[in-house]
Amino acid sequence: MSVSKVMSKCLKVIGKLPQIQNFRCCSNLSLKQRNELFTAEQKRQRENVGRIEKIEVRYLGLPEDVTLVMNRDLSTPYNCAQHLSEGHCKRSVLSLVDGNVPWDMHRPLQASCTLQLLHFTISDPHVVNKTFWRSCSFMLGAALQNAFKEEAHLQLHSFPGPNIKTGSFIHDIVLGSRDWQPTKSELRALSAEMIKLASQDLKFERLEVNQELALEMFKDCRYKKEQLPSISQQNRGRIVLYRMGTHIDISKGPMISFSRFVGRCTVAAIHKLADEGEHDALYRVQGIALPPAFVINHVAYGILEDRAKKLNPARLPNEPFEESHVQIA
């Protein structure tokens, strides 16, 4: 049997194999330990807030500007949205602090500030679009983890900064095959896994940790371990992590608030980039997605899919490492 056929057997067909959760690129044990460390550190940081101090958050937007009294280092933009209306909670993707700082909806506010809640139909969607693209790359990593059996030797490498002009979001990976050419059914399986994650309405959680804890969390991930010291050095010894469901990865962010904001989605192509070691190879997985509120016809979406199939020219992961390889600008 050819190596490509072996790889095909390593990729599950979503819906036909109910045992999909039994096999991961990282063992269930290591994934569980990573999440336990994330949760424990998240709890420790919340408990260390100490005396609760009040801050004034001046919300700017519809239906009217209003000042909210919130809790420093505990209250988030999403909590502010809860004080405004259910509609604000349902459509807010990202927030803007003090007029120019993109801020995750679930990231605690650190001081009195002005706050704007952003959605996909604002007049200048540039920041929201970049955040959406970045979040899709992050979700693609989760989908890949879920879809491959352990014997595929999948290792998530990194995802470069979002560049909407390229026509695709990407995630670079390493696989234990040098000649895998994915079939249409395999690409559809990965697309289905993305849609499944979106339907679960998972929260994107941000956590900043020190290098020592990050190295412990990713001790079973070769490429993450190699990248962490450089990232830490460029960020005053700190590493920013995100979690969606059980998937945890490195990114400077920000991310969208919930996975439900990813609507129509296609994993369009997988390109081999280079051989890696004696048996492995680097691959670039590329996709296209739209928010649920954006409805276009089949022909127009097909054009987007065709564009997303072309090799994305972003920096290759086997080039000299820089922070931009893993963290999103």
Image (cartoon, rainbow, N blue to C red):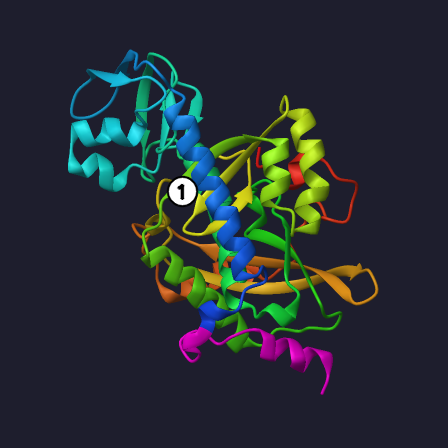
Badge 1 amino acid: Phe
- Quadrant hosting residue 45: top left
Where residue 67 sits: x, y (%)? Answer: 21, 14
Quick check: 117 above or below 145? Answer: above
Does the rendering let one see residue 314?
Answer: no
**Where 137 sits versus 81, above or below?**
below
Farthest residue to the bottom: give it: 1
- Tell me where the magenta segment starts and ends, as one range: 1-19
Q: Which residue position holds label 1?
A: 204
Is residue 36 in view? yes
Q: Nearer the viewer, residue 309 or 4?
A: 4
Q: Is residue 8 magenta?
A: yes
Residue that appears at 68% across and 49% down: 313
Determine if the magenta segment contains residue 3. Answer: yes
In depth, the one of 303 and 281 nearer the eye is 281
Residue 259 position within the rendered picture, expressed as x and y whole percent measured from the top left: 37, 49
Dot 1, how many residues are within 10 Å of its Cα: few (below 14), some (14-19), or many (20+)?
Answer: many
Q: Residue at x 65, y 51 (%)?
A: 221
* Residue 293 image point, x, y percent: 29, 50
- Total marks drawn? 1
Q: On screen, 88 above or below 189?
A: above
**Quarter of the figure with the N terminus:** bottom right
Residue drawn at the location 39% of the way across and 31% of the way down: 124
**In this rendering, position of residue 20 left or right of residue 292:** right
